[in-house]
Every structure is written in C-alpha cells, then in structure tokens.
Image (tube, grey):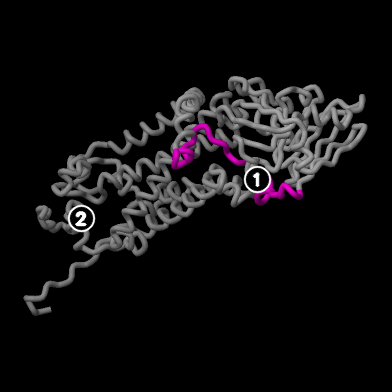
C-alpha cells in the first residue's frame, strides 16, 4: 500500500498451537470428570443424589488413570515443540514474576508469556496430577502397602482435591475475566495489542519489535 | 525458549518437587495427622453454625451405597423380619420396633477406608432383645443381615450379635435416621468397622454358620474389630 498515514494492521500472534490446545482441553475434560465423580464419592448429599457408587468409582478411577496421558503424549511426541517450550517458560521465574506477585508493585512488572499466577497454577495442577494418581492408586489397590498408608493416602487425596477445586475455579474465573486470552485457548491466536500490553517481553521475543513501555497507573 | 526467560531460575521445578515431597510425607504421616485433626478440629467443625466447615475432610461421614440411587422406604411401609432358626419368626412394623426398650450408645464411628466420626450418638433396640423375643434355636450359631437395597448383606457370629453394643438403630444424633444413613433402621455394630453396620435393614436371619457379607466377598475381613482387622491399627471404638 502507498498511503503512509494508515498503519498496516499488526498480525495476531500464535499463543497456543493445536497440540497445546488439544492437550489443554483433553486434560480439562478429564479434570472435570474426576472432580465431579470425586465429589459424588465424597460428599454425602451428592452421593445420595447420584448413587451407583461402584459405577461412579469406576469412572473416577479410569479418568484418573488417564489424566496424565494427554500431557505425556503432547510432551513426548515430535509434535510437542511448543508445549515443551511453554513448560520451560512455566519452570523459569524472572525477577518481574516476583514484582508481579506483590499487588503493590504489580503494574511495574514487564511479563513474559506467563504471569506468576499462571506459573503457580500450572505447577500446582501438574503436581496434583502426580499426587492424586499416586494416592489414588494406594486407595484403590491398598493390599500391597503398609497399613497406615491407606489412611495417609486418603488424607493427602482429600486435601489436594480441595486445592484442585480452588485452583480450577480460580483458573476459570480469571479466564472469564480476560475473554481474549480465553478465546486464544480455543482458536490459538491472540492480538498483538494484547501481547504488547499484557505480556511485553513475550511480544518482543515473538516479533523482535519493542513493546510499549508499561502504562503508569492512573 | 525466549531470551527473556533463559536467565530465570527454575522455581517451577522446585515448587513441583516440593509438593510431591510434601505429598509423600503426607502419605507416611497422614494417619497420625488425620487422627490429631479428628481429635482437635472436628469438635470445632461440629459447632460451626453455617455447616460449611463440614465440607472439610475431617470427622465426617462419607455416604457409601453399593446400588443405583439411594434406597428409600417410608417408616409407614417399613418391615423388619427376624427368621431362620428361630422358634417364632417376627415381622415387625416400625412402630412395633420402636415400642421395644430403647438403648443408647455413643461411640466413635470408624470406617475401614480411614475416616472416623467422633462420639456419634445412636438409639435403637438391642439386637439381643430382638433375638430373645424370636427365640434362637440351639442349632443357630450366626446371624445374617439383609438390606432392602437389594444387594448388601452382612453377618455376625451369635456371640458377637449378643453384645450390649450391637443395635438395630433408628435414631442418629437424636434425629430419626435418614435414608442416607441407612434409615428407617439399620444395624449398628459399635466395636467393628462401618461395613458391618448394614444399612437399610430388612431381614435378620439366624443361620447355622457365618456367611461372608458384601465387602467380605470382595476381600474385607469377616471379623471386623476396629484396630484388630483389615491390617489397620486404629484405636478401638
């Protein structure tokens, strides 16, 4: 184009590729399954409503055993390049993540692809998958384990379940408050404007262009 | 990876491994911690007027059913039969059952899966009184209990069944026994794990020998003394 006064529209950035989105939604579906069947096994009024305890338990156990599979398939396959890169990003904390964690200094943080809350949420839920799988196996196949382990496993399973409910509800609440970020988990792409303002370091790494300086609080 | 995050420190890995380690410690010590919580925190939860704290996994009943839906029967329709090796079979209505002398027992309720509810108050008819009323024949040595859920059954030796702390219970915490707790009436065997306390009790049959119950056919111990069976060491109830 020749008109110098019109800025060419900035292309959207790819935030999550097809593999990452598939892993996310498959894991989400399995999490919902274990959470609701788990609630039905745990809470009296829901147990009473649902009944069919043996069936609910079977669904809970099968979904729980399947829970790590999407993530492992995504990470281990040749298709998992972006997923592995994001796992590395979730692992690594930069000084700005700590700046962001403090509410008072949050506006000053220049973030990379994920904020500290997203990193903590992903880390906790990843650990929860391992913990729930391990303790669940002890609860379901208790014979070979020492006597007290079954109670101990039930204890850990119960409290981590409470944490999972809080983390998942929080995750969904934050997603609903940022519809653009939520839709990028469905369609993959996100606007350059979102990336520039909310994740400036990621924008710079993706485009090679400088992001705007962070806004001063009004 | 992004240049920006290459220099970051691996906090994620540390948190992840720390949580796994904490979980392993929890499995090893959870039995003691759970016992401590149920002695110290459960009474506070019992006094919470909102009832929200009762969602916490401390000192609470878990409702187990083995069939589809919750077995329900109105008190007016309820019947309890005592049959088998007895002189005079009984077929009691709920009113006839509750007109018998009442016995109250307050003890901890312990499940074989680990949870324990402290100081639960039960009221009902002593099983021994029912057996005496029907007249146990000399060739009987065991008692079988059948639930009206259509699947569950349990049994005791005659000696166990004649204990003071074995009831056909119809009240829990001063309230009529609800369906989810096994009402209108259930067996309550105070010194044994909860699976012995057959819910939705329909039939008491005197038999020549002990027949393993629902969970016992699936691996649980037939003599289910709390702390002395199923490989567990809970303190006795």
The x and y percentages for residue A160 are: 44, 38
The x and y percentages for residue A150 are: 56, 29
Residue B17: which numbered mark, if any? Answer: none
Looking at the rendered structure, the secondary structure element under dot 1 is helix
Q: In the picture provided, is A96 more to the left or to the right than B74?
A: left
- Crowd rating for badge 2 (residues with CA inside 10 Å; few <14, some 14–19, many 20+): many
Residue sitting at x 41%, y 51%: A74
Is A138 or A202 nearer to us in this picture?
A138
Labels 2 & 1 near each other (Cβ < 8 A): no
Q: In the picture provided, is B50 more to the left or to the right than B60?
A: left
Q: Which residue is mark 2?
A: A198
Residue sitting at x 46%, y 25%: B40
Which region shows up in magenta? B49-77
Q: Which residue is mark 1?
A: B179
Identify whether A11 is placed above or below B32.
below
- Asked whether the viewer can see residue A150, the reply is no
Asked whether residue B71 is drawn in magenta, I would say: yes
Residue sitting at x 34%, y 54%: A173
Is B31 or B62 nearer to us in this picture?
B62
Looking at the rendered structure, the secondary structure element under dot 2 is helix
Principal secondary structure, stretch drawn in magenta: loop
Asked whether the residues under marks 2 and 1 belong to the same chain, the reply is no
Is A166 or B3 nearer to us in this picture?
A166
Quadrant in which the C terminus of chain B is drawn: top right
Identify whether B234 is placed above or below A153.
above
Identify whether B195 is placed above or below A87.
above
Foreground mark, 2 or 1? Answer: 1
The x and y percentages for residue A205 are: 19, 53
- Crowd rating for badge 1 (residues with CA inside 10 Å; few <14, some 14–19, many 20+): some
């Amino acid at each position: 184009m020749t008109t110098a006064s019109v800025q060419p529209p900035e292309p959207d950035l790819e935030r999550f590729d097809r593999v990452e989105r598939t892993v996310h939604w498959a894991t989400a579906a399995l999490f919902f399954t274990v959470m609701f069947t788990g609630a039905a096994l745990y809470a009296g009024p829901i147990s009473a409503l649902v009944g069919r305890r043996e069936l609910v338990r079977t669904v809970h156990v099968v979904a729980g055993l399947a829970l790590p599979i999407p993530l492992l398939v995504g990470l281990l396959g040749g298709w998992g390049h972006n997923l592995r890169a994001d796992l590395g990003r979730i692992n690594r904390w930069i000084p700005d993540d700590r700046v962001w964690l403090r509410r008072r200094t949050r506006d000053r943080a220049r973030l990379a692809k994920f904020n500290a809350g997203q990193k903590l949420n992903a880390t906790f839920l990843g650990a929860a998958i391992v913990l729930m799988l391990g303790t669940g196996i002890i609860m379901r196949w208790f014979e070979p384990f020492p006597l007290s382990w079954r109670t101990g496993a039930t204890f850990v399973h119960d409290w981590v379940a409470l944490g999972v409910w809080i983390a998942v509800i929080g995750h969904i609440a934050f997603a609903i408050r940022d519809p653009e970020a939520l839709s990028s988990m469905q369609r993959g792409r996100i606007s350059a404007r979102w990336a520039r303002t909310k994740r400036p370091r990621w924008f710079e790494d993706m485009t090679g262009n400088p992001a705007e300086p962070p806004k001063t609080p009004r | 990876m992004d240049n920006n995050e290459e220099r970051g420190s691996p906090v994620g890995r540390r948190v992840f491994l720390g949580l796994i380690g904490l979980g392993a410690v929890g499995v090893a010590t959870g039995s003691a911690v759970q016992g401590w919580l149920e002695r110290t925190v459960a009474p506070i939860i019992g006094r919470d007027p909102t009832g929200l704290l009762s969602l916490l996994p401390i000192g609470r009943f878990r409702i187990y059913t083995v069939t589809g839906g919750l077995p329900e029967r109105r008190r007016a329709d309820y019947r309890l039969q005592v049959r088998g090796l007895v002189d005079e079979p009984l077929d009691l209505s709920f009113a006839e059952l509750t007109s018998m002398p009442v016995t109250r027992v307050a003890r901890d309720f312990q499940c074989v899966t680990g949870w324990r509810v402290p100081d639960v108050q039960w009221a009902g008819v002593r099983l021994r009184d029912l057996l005496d009323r029907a007249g146990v024949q000399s060739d009987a040595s065991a008692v079988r209990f059948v639930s009206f859920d259509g699947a569950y059954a349990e049994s005791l030796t005659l000696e166990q069944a004649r204990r003071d702390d074995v009831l056909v219970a119809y009240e829990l915490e001063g309230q009529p026994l609800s369906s989810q707790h096994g009402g209108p009436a259930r067996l309550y065997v105070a010194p044994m794990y909860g699976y012995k306390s057959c819910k939705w009790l329909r039939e008491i049959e005197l038999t020549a020998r002990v027949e393993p119950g629902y969970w016992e056919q699936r691996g649980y111990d037939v003599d289910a003394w709390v702390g002395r069976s199923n490989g567990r060491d809970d303190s006795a109830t």
